[in-house]
Amino acid sequence: MKKTIYLWLIKLVSLFYVNKPKSGTVYLMSFGNNLAFIKALAKKDELLVCYQAQCQAAAKQLEASGIKTMLIQDGFGFAFKKLGLILTARKLFCDNYYAFLGGCLLDHHQVKVIQVWHANGAIKTFGLEEPRTATRSASDQRRFRKVYDQFDDYVVASPKMGQVFANSYQVSPTKMKVLGYPRSDRLFKQDWQKETKARLLAAYPDLRTKEVILYAPTYREVRDNSGQVALNLPPNFDEVVANLAPKQVLVIKLHPHLKASAVKLKQRYSHNPKVLWLDEFSTEEVLVITARLITDYSSVIFDYSLLPNAGQLIFYCYDLEAYAAYEGLQSDFVSWLPGPLVKSAAELSQILAQPYQLQDLVEFNRLWNTQNDGQATERVLAYYYPGQY
């Protein structure tokens, strides 16, 4: 009921802005990993970045570049003081699902709402294809659809991802713009690769002689019976760590929204020289020195596969059946995984004990990274700001 009332408030406020002149661009930011594209947008149009609290550090970087930013969070203050700045934009870029959009009255002849998702591809299901959505009330599902229907365009890197969106949001495939993901561009820049690798090895010189294994699982909020954050680890993971060879080192990178879980894991392995965290470097940066990537259902694979140093990808899906039933997985994902799928710590240790073999990622990238070639930003800007090219 509270959500319904709030969306009615959003609708009421938006009535005052629906016919007002539109100008400028707004970027809604819930992930702080697309800053290069945002800075490029600022060169094309008057830009306001509306960010959520977890992106405060990214917002400060943008502010240092002279870009206007504004913290947003649902509430009366947002509805009455900040929503109007969003509703008077001519273009609205979104990097995620934003519930308040479902209540907005928008004249789509004046305003274009563009989804620039925060990942190149998808292993997990989302939207209306997520299993839990079917258990939600009819009113909830209508509320979700109102948000999905607000997007005029979906910027995607491949027809494959376009089909995922069309299925997940039940929207027309004609809304899919296969232009590439701007966020992927820097993965192709040799200067960035070299500079990032140099910074990493300067900070951790011992890694020059190590085989770096990155464990980057998908988002899981694990809690114990009392509701406290619990260790976010697969069964018998300590055995995997113990079985690492002397020349191997494990870097753990949890989802950025799992800071409490990360704190507990650091405490567990604080005195183990085989485990590193590299907190001052992002997951994307660590990929530059990664020889083997262990994940499960994370979209990190779509980034790693673009790097020239991409080695072995291992899918540690210890909860495959349960996860598929609860969270949902793309029905064909096993057929296109570019690496072995294992379900136990023993299987994982066995693979890590063998010299790794490079996977052939050509077909995988043709499927998922079709238009990710280092020029995505240029194509997106040329498409949405054609008069300035």
Image (spheres, rainbow, N blue to C red):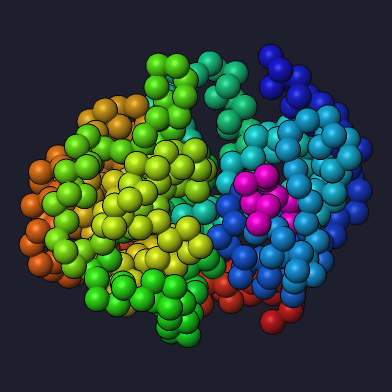
**Residue beneath the point at 10% across and 43% down:** 346
- Which residue is drawn at the image coordinates 58% and 52% (left, top)? 31
Q: Is residue 174 above or below residue 317?
A: below
The segment highlighted magenta reads 49-57
Residue 140 visible: yes
The quarter holding residue 209 reads bottom left
Q: Nearer the viewer, residue 57 or 72?
A: 57
**Could you tell me which quadrant the C terminus lies in?**
bottom right
* 51 magenta-colored: yes
163 sits left or right of 17 in the view = left
- How many marks do you count on the picture? 0
Residue 86 as seen in the image, left or right of residue 101: right
Query: Residue 192 vs residue 14: left or right?
Result: left
Q: Is residue 329 left or right of residue 134?
A: left
Corner quadrant of residue 380: bottom right
Residue 183 pos. (x, y %): 52, 65
